[in-house]
Image: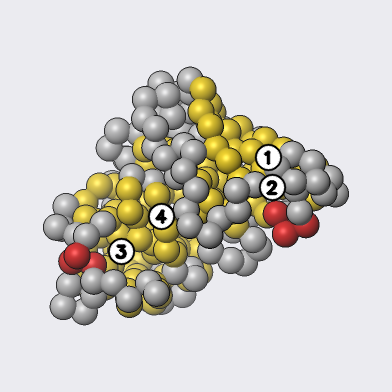
Amino acid sequence: QVQLQESGPGLVKPSETLSLTCAVSGYSISSGYYWGWIRQPPGKGLEWIGSIYHSGSTYYSPSLKSRVTISGDTSRNQFSLKLSSVTAADTAVYYCAREIGYGTHDYWGQGTLVTVSS
Amino acid sequence: QSALTQPASVSGSPGQSITISCTGTSSDVGSYNLVSWYQQHPGKAPKLMIYEVSKRPSGVSNRFSGSKSGNTASLTISGLQAEDEADYSCCSYAGDYLVFGGGTKLTVL
């Protein structure tokens, strides 16, 4: 059974960098597929952030590309998200997910709320 | 890059069928058969219901079906049940990125 678990600070100050990690169990991220991040502001819809392929290549949302970095750590079987220069608009529940095809996310983490506030 | 357009809400009675639309452009929905649908109950993570326009993952009820015509994809739920009450979101590949819809709240009356 594939499981994903997000972790990281629940509170980030404006202008700082948001950092989250997704630990994967039940499947080796180096074996295949994309591994992605999606967020959901309170009361709003889902927003795709970006994904990393098992080979290390990435693709990002055009609207967030200048601020986003997704990286993988195959030794720990986890991947990470960094979002720089955050504002209140970045407050959201952040999900990590396995992407078995473009847009096909079959396993999701439970999500973690990140609040941007001073 | 604009979100796909979904109705904010739809409703139906138990046993009825409903359809949720997801309208994009010729650059996303209209160009690729890579539309997926997700069900999300309050406080829970999304669940994949349909992928590649009309394919159902193992374990998803055959009451859920997907289709596409031009720039609009659709999710149909037949034989509505109380447990189907949730938010539904579509997602499409757009060439070198993904785009989600704004989400539709389904109410089972």
- Residue A109, percent across and down? 44, 69
Alpha carbons under labels 2 and 4: distance apart = 20 Å
Q: Residues within 10 Å of mark 4 (few under 14, many from 20)?
A: many
**Figure label count:** 4
Q: Which residue is mark 2?
A: B105
Identified at 38% across, 46% down, the residue is A103
- Between circles 1 and 4, the one closer to the viewer is 4
Q: CB atoms at circles 3 and 2 under 8 Å apart?
A: no
Residue type, mark 4 in image: His
- Chain bearing mark 3: A
Q: Residues within 10 Å of mark 1 (few under 14, many from 20)?
A: few
Compared to residue B79, the image places residue B46 above or below, namely below
Q: Which residue is mark 4?
A: A105
Q: Which residue is mark 1?
A: B8
Q: Residues within 10 Å of mark 3 (few under 14, many from 20)?
A: many
Q: Which residue is mark 3?
A: A81
